[in-house]
Image: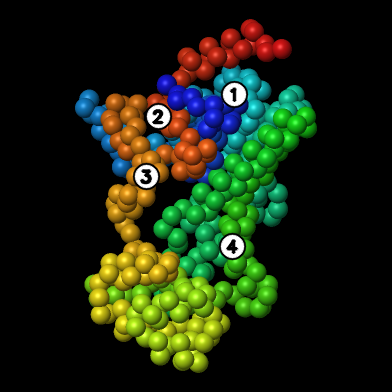
Amino acid sequence: MTRTIDPQRQPLLGLRVVEFCTIAAGPFCAMQLGDLGAEVIKIEPPGGDPMRAWPPLTESPDGSRYSENFASLNRGKRSLVLDLKEQGQQRLARRLCLSADVVLENNRPGVMERLGLGPAGLLAEKPSLVYASISAFGQEGPRAQQGGFDVVLQAFSGIMSVTGSAGGEPVKCGVPLSDMATGLYAAFAIVAKLLAVRAGGPGGHIDASMLGASLGIAALQTSEYFGSGRDPLPLGSAHPRNAPYQAFRAADDWLVLAAGNDRLWQAVTGVIDRPDLLADPRFASIGERAANQAALKIEMERALAAAPAATWIERFNAVGVPCAPINSYSAVLADPQVAARNWVLPMTLPNGADIRTVGPTLGLDGAPPPLSGPPPALDGDREAVAALLDREEAEPVP
């Protein structure tokens, strides 16, 4: 596998991550580290990460198929299949872990210990190792042994209680928010721990839970409950403390408007030619507008019905009022801003099919990190990884 190397934008070059993860949160975490230069060796069970079977499955000219979902979370990695129930393969996995700077796993608590690959044993042998565990509820506590996918944690954590419209059926966020937030939390903690190791400190065990991450990103909702004693409620696209700050219907389509202060509200009334709304006591302050936003929405949509959404977006942008169309993914991926940032990149799958993917989206010194490489073929790096280990163990680094 060819890796693009750019030391200026890949600060984790030279570090090795051994990943024992499937589906989303763990693979997403490891991919972030790989995008920043780390070498990621993905240990897969016999049959591979189940996400390899998720559609869309893109065919190559020879008829073989490869999951674009899997590719989107596993670019730039090496793949090695190990049956960790076999002692010989456990020993190989242990050798890999002890060669690494980071071990990342997302099994239920206790599984890695039973396989002889738990954090205590590995850290005893290599104190500088950073060992990160991702789980649904955390490594300890009464729910530690419960499993959970993204929708389960969106429900349990309260996210679904504030998602959707008042009185509607429960809905989850359309993006796997709990999975991806946990992956980012874990990556952040790993990098922080690596900095401590580089400064001469020990490694250690990171416990990243989907429940903890889901509560962590809900700081506004939890603080609303602590401060008021009331549960936050679903408000559709509206905001509990700001208005106008939601989706509105124009003559032909919807647009989102976010006028979160008095200056922007004054600009809105000018654009829609409704200066009388400034004198309306129901809308005299941010608090009054939020308390009366159902009435405000009626007044806003009466005015917005006079022109298409694109016209209003142009007018609001002209006076600095934040607004946007409600884009489909086809629309946003074709937007000139995305093109200017060079975020959509070509990639060739292991089966030879050419696809597009959203690459790294961070800016480092004026540009994103390079694409670390394509996703791996299942067990496609067995010989290379074995040779790498043999070479390193025969020629230990001083």
- Is tag 1's residue or tag 4's residue first in the polypeptide sequence? 1
- Pair 1/3: label in front: 3
Quickly name the residue at label 4. 218
Does residue 352 appear to the left or right of 138 in the view shown? left
Query: Which amino acid is tagged 1?
Result: Gly
Q: Nearer the viewer, mark 1 or mark 4?
A: 1
CA neighbours of label 4 inside 10 A, class few (<14), some (14 to 19), many (20+) = some
In the rendered image, which residue does mark 3 sit on? 340
Q: Position of residue 199 (x, y in %)?
A: 75, 31
Q: Secondary structure at mark 1?
A: loop
Q: Amino acid at mark 3?
A: Ala
Pointers 1 and 2 in contact (C-beta within 8 Å): no
Query: Which part of the image, by quadrant, shows the C terminus?
Result: top right
In the image, what residue occupies the spot 69% across and 35% down?
195
Q: Earlier in the sequence, mark 1 or mark 3?
A: 1
**Which of 282/201 is in front?**
282
Between 95 and 223, the residue placed more toward the observer is 223
Upstream in sequence: badge 1 or badge 2 = 1
Q: Which residue is mark 2?
A: 374
x and y percentages locating residue 180 in the rendered image: 51, 49
- Decide which of tag 2 and tag 4 comes sooner along the chain: 4
Q: Secondary structure at mark 2?
A: loop
Residue at 32% x, 66% y is 314
